[in-house]
Amino acid sequence: MAVIAVTKERRAGETRVAATPETAKKLAAAGFEVVVEAGAGAGASFADADYQAAGASIAKSAKDAVAKADLLFKVRAPEADEIKALKPGAFVAALLNPYNEKATVEALAKAGASAFAMEFIPRITRAQVMDALSSQANLAGYRAVIEAAEAYGRALPMMMTPAGTIAPAKVFVMGVGVAGLQAIATARRLGAVVTATDVRPATKEQVESLGAKFVAVEDEEFKAAETAAGYAKEMSKEYQAKQAELISGHIAKQDIVITTALIPGRPAPKLVSAAQVASMKSGSVIVDLAVEQGGNVDGAKLGEVAVTANGVKIMGVANLPGRIAADASSLYARNLLAFAELFRNKEGQFAPDLEDEILKAALVTHGGAVVHPQLTA
């Protein structure tokens, strides 16, 4: 019987866990032996007893959990002691952050592990249930609005009282991917007046379907600014200047700005300049979801709330999904549950086919080497 190990996350501030009692039970029912390190689920409010009731066994340490594991499930990349404890040829699945944690990727290769980066799960229909980036970005977008609302210090919806009317907050979302769409939806549910922008014309309809207003210079160049594959084209300098002028005027009127733009393998693009921050009124809030990749906002600092001279709060909150650890863990664990099915053949035996298009796309290390083309180029 193949063994799946789940260990405690050791990164500072990481509250999530790679399996829940629900997924442990389903993994056991599928024929896996599940071993969970003691206390692994504590940050997400999952007790060891709940894992045991689900059919998992509890190991006293990470070393004990990993020693016999055929497959190690993690949220973040494994630490050096966990890698050292892996048996030869073991498989690892985690959010490896492979572009930035190259030393860890190399250590996994050196240890002979076959490691999969959940970030590299392909965006195909068959793999949607395994798409960890989307499941976590969805929650990050939600939590960004909650964090902003708390920091804002005023009500978000319009309120009409005998003492007078409170105007609704104005929320501007920059970047309409998974996180941005959830931020729009959440801010709308809380009663804010929401606007959003993105470089892809197709997102206009998505924004408007959520009851928000799309903000962009919608000229002929913009209408043709998307490839057949759905990617944004590089815009002319003339267009960029017109768009920047429009956005600058818009930002100055906003109470809350949420930025969500990320580019895989590259620093996050700068969307909000120091001058634009300075144009906002005192008490305004900016939440930078890209702060862990360098940030979209001038002045954003990882793990800090920076308050500018004009009283604007720039929030560089790390690991937003980890602030709703139970739900984030549940979704991520279900991503891994679906991923685990790829490691079994039709007879139910542990026999991963590394030529499977999903496994092949996510495979980072194998046979003692780093094998992913984006990491070896």
Image: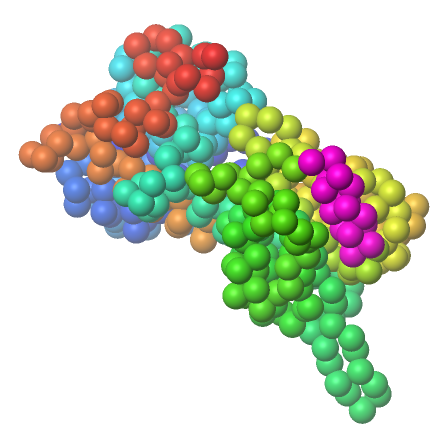
Q: Could you say where residue 194 lies in the image, as x and y percent from the top left?
A: 66, 64
Q: Could you say where residue 286 lies in the image, as x and y percent from the top left?
A: 74, 50
* 121 shown above or below 173: above
Label count reads: 0
Quadrant location of the N terminus? Answer: top left
* 36 shown above or below 98: below
- Residue most toward the left? 347
Q: Quadrant of residue 56?
A: top left
Write the start and end of the magenta stretch as one range.
236-251
Magenta stretch: dominant SS?
Answer: helix
* 352 shown above or below 19: above
- Taking the image as shown, residue 222 lies to the left or right of residue 8, namely right
- Residue most toward the bottom? 162
**Residue 365 drawn in magenta:** no
Q: Could you say where residue 276 lies in the image, as x and y percent from the top left?
A: 83, 46
Q: Residue at x 57, y 37 (%)?
A: 233
Q: Nearer the viewer, residue 276 or 311?
A: 276
- Taking the image as shown, residue 182 lies to the left or right of residue 170, namely left
Q: Nearer the viewer, residue 62 or 212?
A: 212
Q: Residue at x 52, y 52 (%)?
A: 202
**Residue 250 drawn in magenta:** yes
Q: Residue at x 46, y 27 (%)?
A: 96
Picture colour scheme: rainbow
